[in-house]
Amino acid sequence: MVEGISPESHALIIPHHMDSGHTISRSGSSLCSAQSRPINPNKDISLYGYGSVAWKNRIDEWKRKQSEKMQNASNGNRGELFGDEVDDPDLPTSDEGRQPLSRKLPISSNKINPYRIIILLRLLILGLFFHYRLLNPLSDAYGLWLTSVICEIWFAISWILDQFPKWYPVERETYLDRLSLRYEKEGKPSQLADIDIFVSTVDPMKEPPLITANTVLSILAVDYPVDKVSCYVSDDGAAMLTFEALSETSVFARKWVPFCKKYSIEPRAPEWYFAQKIDYLKDKVHPEFVRERRAMKREYEEFKVRINSLVAMAQKAPEEGWTMQDGTPWPGNNVRDHPAMIQIFLGHNGVVDNEGNKLPSLVYVSREKRPGFNHHKKAGAMNSLVRVSAVLSNAPYILNVDCDHYINNSKALREAMCFMMDPTSGSKICYVQFPQRFDGIDQHDRYSNRNVVFFDINMKGLDGLQGPIYVGTGCVFRRQALYGFDAPVTKKPPGKTCNCWPKWCCSCCGSRKKNRKGNKKQKVKHRETSRQIHALVSIREEPEGLENESALLVPRQKLEKKFGQSPGFVASTLQENGGMVKGLDPSSLLGEAMHVISCGYEDKTEWGKEVGWIYGSVTEDILTGFKMHCHGWRSVYCIPKRPAFKGSAPINLSDRLHQVLRWALGSVEIFLSKHCPIWYGYGGGLKSLERLSYINSVIYPWTALPLIVYCTLPAICLLTGKFIVPEISIYASIIFMALFASIAATGILEMQWGGVGVDDWWRNEQFWVIGGVSSHLFALFQGLLKVIAGVDTSFTVTSKGGDDGEFSDLYLFKWTNLLIPPTTLVVINVVGVVAGVSNAINNGYESWGPLFGKLFFALWVIIHLYPFVKGMLGKQDRAPTIVIVWTLLLVSICSLLWVRVNPFLAKNDGPVLEVCGLDCN
């Protein structure tokens, strides 16, 4: 007898993958299907022996269990069917609805292994290169040699910080059909999670309301259950123009949303849908589509006219300020001193679209502002939205987009849920980051606005480590991660069980085994943590317990210090799966929402320190993602075949440099703060290679100093006749050629596995130099002034593209101080080239040999700055005639003066007289 199996029963077959004591293998193949394996017909079946594998009574038992589970599911116990049974070994995982919702696709070994070998070879070549450089100084140009070596060492360190986080690049694939099979059963309510979507805007003059309206419309028409989507628009400028535009948008949405869902159009932002230069009748078979599309286009043109009229009216504000229709003054007339404002346009009082279907919620939010309070710019606005949404809808997931980043793929939310709601790995993911894609960029991408090297190479590399960094938009967050909670630990000590809330098990279970071996202090700390966990669980189950302080093991002061003095909001933070808190009066929700966005709410709390978007830098995105990774969370990079989001980029030179300046300034602020990844977060959950990537993200602006010095060296060498490298031997020439070959090979292999074109890679290299010698340099000085002298820099909102014509802003020239350093470098290198060539012509053939290395050095700088020069010329396809004439004239004059003056050569007023040694007397 084996586990109650009679000896009359015989084993029919032993499958390849057998779990001891289980009928079904973990690979998902049942024994019935396994019997198709060939069996020797001449062999007596009793010779297969006895076992516990293919017995008829166990098959019947398994079928009975399955029927019971299906019966429970039909009775409403859906969580039992789709929850713990995922790990049930008796469950056939061959069912499509039980399969993983996503999978990781490592880069092919044929591509990644040569890439890793080249990296190691390049590291070896760099060692040989610096060995040669340091052992061969130049005595006659020691200053030039030492300066160049210091710059080269810094460039090598920067390369290491940038290269090694790309050691394990991966790609990912999602299965939307499995998501639907698992969470959207036919005839039953959808079990997909709720999502709150945040749209942030500040200045409607720089961020046109029409662009914001298109973003909101694409959100309201997204392919997701309407009762699970809430859109919150943050107007941090308290502009009546934004408020009125949003009101018009809510009216037009009642026509636009049903049109999009009826015909499944893409994208669902009307401006970009109607601007597509494609055959819109392709794959459309509905006979009414053409008529309804024409009617919708007319409706949208009328909508644009109404929005444009609002913009025109807002150009001239009345001296007494704006007045609403009821005669009361607009509360936001004073941008720096106004009360909080919340307006729910959609999602209340049974508002439906033109076909009678429910619409997602649309909420306008403008937080309170008062003089004397630090409002923390965008980070403060986002934290206000976190609290408002927690009170009004409290979705477990949050999508953050800029006002100019519309949803280009209507299934983008489902793509993110394939990671977040995956039952095996989703609980450890703090956010899903999508790449940024842009419209309205010129074909050649002169200023590298697409930034594809970063989004298609660097971010894929980080995804193989602990996940990509947060880039500020197009990111779906887990709300609990934003609250500063640690990532859960799924492993439990053998034989131990825990009844704690799973979100907190990392402290109660995951560290129990380690604490047994620790000292007494660790054990006491563990017990205290466990008491707090169970206390928080009791609050989660009974939020009205917040009113009874004696029922708490955790003092009220600790909760208020972390989240603020709002019982309703604190109770919502303990809802692991979101949802409204039981026991709260719906009539008081609006008042509670107004309270949590008041100016003084964050005082003496952990908002901006450990909770929400982190303060201390204008690039709050890097800092916020960094803190989450330090808490042990991991992130995911999702690249759908159809881009999930698309936005507008500042395509003229001046705006692009200001954008890069803001990013670099934020990195400098983080570098000079306590949150610098060089010394912060040790002992947490941050992995070493992930730390290297964060160090690189805050150190790169400092490369401006060696870069601008290195770009000046060619002109100095040409003017002085000196060089940074001695006469090259055969050994040195081999090292130099090997170094250049390794650089080229690294770039080629990166482009191969990253899917990046040569043009995009070269534009990235060029703008790395342009931004490094201009924006990064100014960011260093501004950051040092802010930290050392307390001189704060004003935040400049980047202008978003309007509808003034294709590439209308590309040739727009705006003077800014950021243009001075690159212009200076171009001029001095051109003068150096002219001087060097003139000197070679004057001195004969022997001087041409040493000149080639110097000319190559100078041309390297000029070629990298070429897009900058082209941007300075304006709209002309060629240089203006007057510029050519003046250039030739100045070059001729400089050449003649150089030949005549020669300031860097010794001057002799007469013949050289030497003592012959003979006494002529």
Image: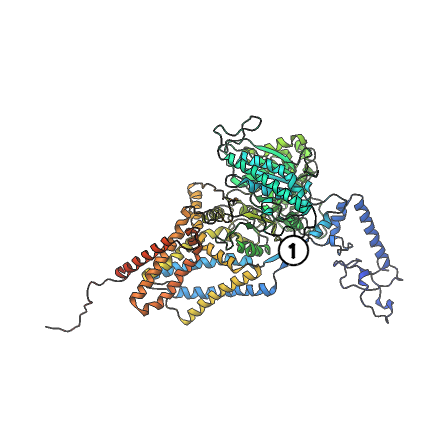
- Give the percent coordinates (x, y) of residue 607: 56, 39
Snapshot quadrant of residue 25: bottom right
Asked whether residue 217 appears in the rendered view, the answer is yes
Tell me the quarter of the image containing the N terminus: bottom right
**Image vertical order of residue 104 relative to residue 567, above or below:** below
- Give the percent coordinates (x, y) of residue 139: 33, 64
Q: Is residue 90 left or right of residue 741?
A: right
807 or 188, which lies in front? 807
Give the total number of marks visible in the rendering.
1
Snapshot quadrant of residue 243: top right
Asked whether residue 366 appears in the rendered view, the answer is no
> Which residue is disc 1 drawn over?
173
- Give the percent coordinates (x, y) of residue 314: 51, 34
The extreme left residue here reads: 921
Q: Is residue 522 left or right of residue 703?
A: right
Q: Is residue 418 left or right of residue 879?
A: right
The extreme right residue here reads: 8
Residue type, numbered disc 1: Glu
Tell me the quarter of the image containing the C terminus: bottom left
Snapshot quadrant of residue 361: top right
Q: Is residue 723 left or right of residue 429?
A: left
- Give the percent coordinates (x, y) of residue 249: 60, 38
419 or 452, which lies in front? 452
Q: Residues within 10 Å of mark 1 (few under 14, many from 20)?
A: some
